[in-house]
Amino acid sequence: MSACTSALTCLPARLRAMSAAGTVAIVATAALTLTATPHAAAAPRPASTPQVSSRVLDQWIGRALAVMKAKHIPGSYAGILRNIKRESGGNPRAVNNWDSNARAGTPSKGLLQVIDPTFRSFHVAGTAWDIFDPVANIAAACNYAAHTYGSIDNVNSGY
């Protein structure tokens, strides 16, 4: 048997050895407590970020800008990209499960971290009704920002 480097790498072998003794439930419970947790001082992060190429992100922003232009919604590529990087890191499936919106039952979702009621209120015709659709998320967030701040370009922190 090879030497284990941590409690978690040894767990499968220990489970097999302990199953005959009827202690598997105890080990499984202990394994749950051994999983890594973020430090209390660390800022919460969005769900794991899928590898989205900058080309794909550029396409989503470009399509959203075309819809926004047709609907007279102000915003620039640079303003949208800056806010995407801060809000979701480019993860179109990001869900914020830790802030006040999440605690109230309406987590922020998508590239620009929009809550469902805001998405519905500021949805832009011609885009999907799916909050996780990148173009629809960008367009709705920029429409909200235009009504609230004048433009997504004026948003330099969480909104």
Image (cartoon, grey):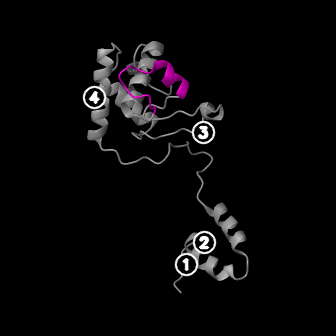
Q: Determine whether, in the image, residue 23 is placed left or right of residue 117.
A: right
Q: CB atoms at circles 4 and 3 under 8 Å apart?
A: no
Mark number, residue 98: 3
Instruction: Report the mark closest to the observer, 4 or 1.
Output: 4
Mark number, residue 62: 4
Instruction: Report the mark closest to the observer, 4 or 3.
Output: 4
Instruction: Report the mark closest to the observer, 2 or 4.
Output: 4
Q: Is residue 13 magenta?
A: no
Judging by the rendered image, the residue that carries numbered circle 1 is 4
Disc 2 marks which amino acid?
Ala
Q: CB atoms at circles 2 and 1 under 8 Å apart?
A: yes
Residue 119 coordinates in the image, percent (x, y): 49, 25
Residues drawn in magenta: 116-131
Judging by the rendered image, the residue that carries numbered circle 2 is 7
Q: Determine whether, in the image, residue 68 is placed left or right of residue 11.
A: left
**The quarter of the displayed image where residue 71 is located:** top left
Provide the secondary structure element on which disc 4 rests. helix
Number of numbered discs: 4
